[in-house]
Image (cartoon, rainbow, N blue to C red):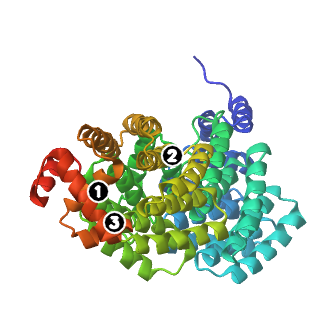
Amino acid sequence: MMKAPEADRSVAGREAFRAERWSEAARLLAEADAEVRLAPEDYEALATARFLISPDQRGAEIMGQATLELVARGDPARAARAAFWAGATLLRLGQTAAGSGWIRRGRRLLDEASLDCVERGYLLVPGVFDALRGGDAHGAAILIEEATVIARRFGDDDLLTLLYSLDGRARLLRGDISGGMAVLDDVMVTATTARMSPLLVGMLFCNVIMTAQHVHDYGRAREWTAAVERWRNGQPDLELYRGECQVQRARVLRIAGDWLHAQDQITSACTVLTQPPPQPAAGLALYEQGELHRLSGRNEDAEAAYSQAAALGHGAQPGLALLRLGQGRVEAARAGIARALAESGDPLVRAALLPAAVEIALAAGQVEEAKAAATELVELATGIGSDYLRAQADVADGSVRVAQGEAAAALSPLRRAAVRWQQLQAAHALARTRLLIGEACQSLGDADAARLEIKGARDTFARLGAAPDVRRSDLILAREASWRLGGLTEREAELLALLATGRTNREIASRLCISEKTVARHVSNIFNKIGVSSRAAATAYALKHGLA
């Protein structure tokens, strides 16, 4: 079959490009260019199509080659635009020298040609990112304003939208979380509904999703990930998820309970990001991989992932402390989370650590310590305004109340958290909250409600593959059956569990906020009901029947 003439392939390539069929556009335009040298605008389309279907490193190489080729084809403005994409991609990969070199090359091309064009605005963007990463909101604002003037003068809506998204991040840096997120909402509506360059949509998506995750706004992260997925449906060959963006998508999937696809995403991300030299997001990817392993009960794999993340400069907390807690190493868990909290004064970082601090303190029997951490979390959640954090704060508050023997008062914050988790579609967090509700109902003597909540939670854990939580649910159900079999009340079962740890009557009284005389009476009743005459025998009974 004869090949179509070059002119026909050029036209077909342009049509495929406009229709966002990137692989077809790249093939047709490359075939046309092999026979007759393409005009600069068609060659730019060829480079863009190739970039969109390639992974980051290859994409940077494509744009670097395009820069040189566009210079040779006599279009320094388009060459400078290609240099921007080569440099921006390399900077994201952590290749600072090479990335900065391409940005400087782009500026030099424009200076040598004495061109006043919109590309000068694009070439200011990496400086904005640098300022934001360094916490310099003022420096970022100056560059954003300078680039905005250029974008408006040339009527470039794509660049204006990109700068608007960076302004949203700058607002967050200044502490205006609600204002910053409102700006980013506007940006994502524009990105997914207007005719924008897919190069820009990918950059905007990563910027917004990473920012939402940073401020614990997983509701927005999930919503905008879904919106971008819908936008991407007509472009199956588009390589959208790159670097940290792919890790953040894996986290969204994990929180939503789609652990299978989350594991696929994070495995792919780790493979790419840890290739020598490791990319900046490699530590984050390994930490997220550790979280999936820990939640699934693969403790050795989790420990290895946390260790590798730490070696690449990413903190291993709170994941490692929660792993230690799951291994029964409560004091190690407590020491790890305490050290991480002592090191950080950043409210957003502390907000990520405090839920684990509450859980670990309660496991160690340190109710006042847990109460202090829960109080701080409530205050941070109120200030940050994230529904995800509000739900975590309600869970922490409810957990502390249960530990204090205030099961009735605990149900209100726990049920409020359950509603929020449902709205956020956070399957695992919802199931863990239902487990706590079930335990509170047990304490109140409502066995039917308790079983409904605990069994419902267990079903979710089993579906997700959360093996440690399945075991915990089974233990709670078995414990209820055991103390009912012995004729014990819920309070007597709780007291027997404490007695089996070797605590004295005084220590038990302090823990349960009752008198020693009441403890002695309970102990006597327990001995009579289970047919023993000593604390050692009672301990043996508790161990045998899963009550300890």
Q: Earlier in the sequence, mark 1 or mark 2?
A: 1
Q: Residue 182 occupies which quadrant of the picture?
A: bottom right
Which residue appears at 60% of the width and 19% of the height? 2
Q: Residue 277 occupies which quadrant of the picture?
A: bottom left
Secondary structure found at label 3:
helix
Image quadrant occupied by the N terminus: top right
Three-letter amino acid code at the position of disc 2? Leu
- Which disc number belongs to residue 430? 2
Residue 240: image location, x then y, percent: 58, 46
Q: CA distance from mark 1 to mark 2?
A: 19 Å
Residue 439: image location, x then y, percent: 41, 48
Secondary structure found at label 2:
helix
Q: Residues within 10 Å of mark 3 (few under 14, many from 20)?
A: many
Q: Earlier in the sequence, mark 3 or mark 1?
A: 3
Q: Nearer the viewer, mark 3 or mark 2?
A: 2
Residue 324: image location, x then y, percent: 28, 62
Q: Earlier in the sequence, mark 3 or mark 2?
A: 3
Can residue 109 be seen at all in this image of the molecule? no
Q: Residues within 10 Å of mark 2 (few under 14, many from 20)?
A: many
Q: CA distance from mark 3 to mark 2?
A: 21 Å
Mark 1 = which residue? 326
Three-letter amino acid code at the position of disc 3? Ala
430 left or right, relative to 360: right
Which residue appears at 39% of the width and 68% of the height? 513
542 left or right, relative to 99: left
Mark 3 = which residue? 321
Three-letter amino acid code at the position of disc 1? Gly
Question: In the rendered structure, are the residues bearing label 1 and label 2 in contact, judged by CB atoms less than 8 Å apart?
Answer: no
Residue 102: image location, x then y, percent: 59, 69
Residue 302 to residue 176: above or below: above
- Which disc number belongs to residue 66? none
